[in-house]
Image (spheres, helix red, strand yellow):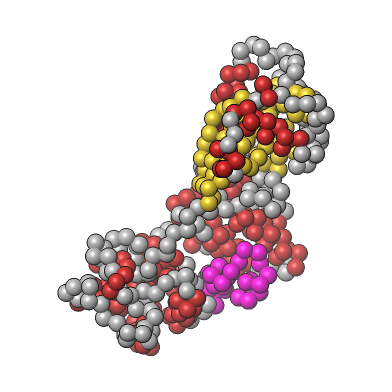
């Protein structure tokens, strides 16, 4: 076990070497540019950056972070914002003083619960902590929505100079290589041991800088593939690097003992990769669940084109975001349906929606095409249809169902998936409405729900 631990001397050298390297080589990132004495502001900025950086690359986050901070520079301003505006910013839409609304990045940050959690954090801090960011680690973990041990460790160490550890993907990789931790990361024993290593090495004098130096090393030098070992400031303490240099055959890996649960086993070694790259052991990828949904885009002329949008319930995948009518279907069910049956199925499902007063005729539902969107855990296929309705049909006024014109669709809190759907159908809808036949009254497009389909 001692082989996988740092000695007191090694910890001292590790801290000193890493901080000296960080002071010279750290990247200039907007969330590291404080210029503020107020720890409350620093804590807020760290929280925003850390939640944005979850599952998202630094280069992407920079644009969103800077835009976010211009709109909501402190906790109070965020707490007073509307959820719709927050989701718009997260989706990649900003207010521009010249162009009014514009996209600054079309893909959006995704994982929209992160945005909602930031909003909830701000409101809770204003309402329960008088606007002061709580500085106790356990309070952050137990009270702030979306804040776990890692995020709380980052905020407490960087903003409040507390010697609390962090453990993200970059830190796991650095520590696994430094101490040759080759056991399964899915095991609690492995995670607990890595947390204990992170606790051992965190620098009490400069905890925030040290934690950031660990992340920086993993992001820029100790990378997953082709690590730059020759540029590493702590290579002399890296057991994986030493092991790579010393062994003549990577099939002969030194182990603490036959029963050591942390050592990498010879049977796990791929001779096509360097030994350093074997740490940490790669997680087996979870296969995304495949799903299929029908989308029905209902539009009208007023005389502008308008589209019916529904606000997703909080329990849904894209909760709080605006969406077109979506009807889920299993693959087996889908395979058994021809085009006529698909349209009938869509109409039957619409009949169950209490806020829609009229339903389309089968003959007037047109297929626009398909698109695919990959969520973190779902591979989603959308089959897209569209239909026209009269100006006063379809909608019973509701805060969760509204008509949006094209500009509003582009600038509202709508997911990337729905933007893809819209882009598939819009050219065909415009073609339909520009042929002169759709500018007057359109008869028989919709029937009352009580009528037979």
The residue located at (56%, 60%) in the rendering is: 51
User: Position of 143 compared to 178: left or right?
Assistant: right
The C terminus appears in which quarter of the rendering? Answer: top right
Residue farthest left in this picture: 248
Does residue 432 lie above or below 414 as drawn? above
Q: Quadrant of residue 131?
A: bottom right
The N terminus appears in which quarter of the rendering? Answer: bottom left
Q: Which of these two is toward me, 43 or 258?
A: 258
Asked if residue 140 is among those painted magenta in the image, a careful observer would answer yes
Q: Which of these two is toward me, 159 or 289?
A: 289
Q: Which residues are magenta?
A: 137-162
Does residue 314 lie above or below 409 as drawn? below
User: Position of 129 compared to 414: left or right?
Assistant: right
Residue farthest front in this picture: 336
Q: Which of these two is toward me, 158 or 337?
A: 337
Asked if residue 6 is among those painted magenta in the image, a careful observer would answer no
Residue 246: x, y in percent? 20, 77
The residue located at (28%, 74%) in the rendering is: 266
Residue 138: x, y in percent? 63, 76
Overall secondary structure of the magenta section: helix
- For the question of whether residue 205 can be seen, the reply is no
Residue 21: x, y in percent? 34, 70
User: Position of 432 compared to 439: left or right?
Assistant: left
Q: Quadrant of residue 429?
A: top right
Residue farthest top in this picture: 436
Residue 331: x, y in percent? 56, 43
The residue located at (62%, 63%) in the rendering is: 146
The residue located at (45%, 82%) in the rendering is: 200
- For the question of whether residue 89 can be seen, the reply is yes
């Amino acid at each position: 076990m001692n082989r996988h631990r740092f000695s007191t001397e090694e910890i001292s050298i590790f801290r000193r070497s890493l901080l000296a390297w960080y002071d010279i080589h750290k990247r200039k990132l907007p969330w590291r540019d404080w210029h503020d004495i107020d720890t409350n502001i620093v804590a807020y900025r760290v929280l925003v950056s850390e939640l944005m950086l979850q599952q998202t690359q630094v280069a992407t986050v920079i644009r969103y972070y800077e835009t976010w901070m211009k709109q909501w520079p402190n906790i109070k301003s965020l707490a007073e914002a509307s959820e719709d505006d927050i989701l718009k910013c997260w989706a990649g839409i900003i207010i521009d003083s010249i162009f009014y609304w514009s996209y600054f990045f079309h893909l959006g940050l995704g994982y929209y619960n992160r945005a909602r959690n930031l909003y909830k954090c701000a409101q809770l801090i204003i309402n329960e902590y008088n606007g002061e960011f709580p500085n106790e680690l356990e309070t952050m973990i137990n009270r702030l929505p979306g804040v776990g041990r890692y995020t709380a460790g980052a905020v407490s160490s960087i903003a409040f100079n507390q010697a609390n550890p962090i453990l993200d993907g970059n830190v796991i990789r650095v520590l696994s290589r430094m101490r040759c931790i080759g056991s399964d990361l899915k095991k609690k024993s492995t995670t607990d041991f890595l947390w204990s290593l992170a606790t051992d090495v965190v620098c009490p004098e400069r905890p925030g800088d040290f934690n950031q130096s660990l992340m920086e090393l993993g992001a820029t030098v100790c990378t997953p593939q082709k690590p730059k070992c020759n540029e590493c400031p702590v290579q002399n303490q890296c057991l994986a690097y030493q092991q790579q240099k010393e062994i003549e055959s990577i099939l002969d890996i030194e182990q603490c003992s036959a029963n050591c649960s942390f050592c990498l086993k010879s049977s796990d070694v791929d001779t096509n990769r360097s030994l350093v790259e074997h740490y940490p052991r790669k997680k087996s990828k979870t296969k995304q669940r495949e799903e299929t949904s029908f989308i029905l885009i209902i539009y009208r002329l007023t005389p502008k084109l308008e589209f019916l949008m529904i606000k997703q319930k909080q329990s849904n995948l894209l909760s709080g975001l605006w969406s077109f009518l979506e009807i889920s279907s299993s693959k087996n069910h889908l395979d058994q349906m021809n085009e006529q049956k698909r349209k009938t199925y869509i109409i039957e499902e619409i009949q169950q929606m209490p806020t829609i007063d009229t339903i389309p005729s089968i003959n007037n539902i047109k297929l626009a095409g398909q698109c695919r969107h990959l969520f973190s855990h779902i591979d989603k296929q959308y089959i897209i249809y569209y239909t026209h309705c009269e100006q006063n049909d379809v909608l019973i006024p509701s805060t969760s169902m509204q008509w949006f014109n094209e500009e509003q669709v582009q600038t509202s809190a709508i997911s990337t998936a729905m933007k893809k759907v819209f882009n598939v159908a819009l050219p065909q809808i415009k073609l339909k409405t520009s042929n002169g036949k759709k500018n007057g009254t359109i008869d028989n497009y919709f029937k009352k729900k009580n009528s037979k389909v």
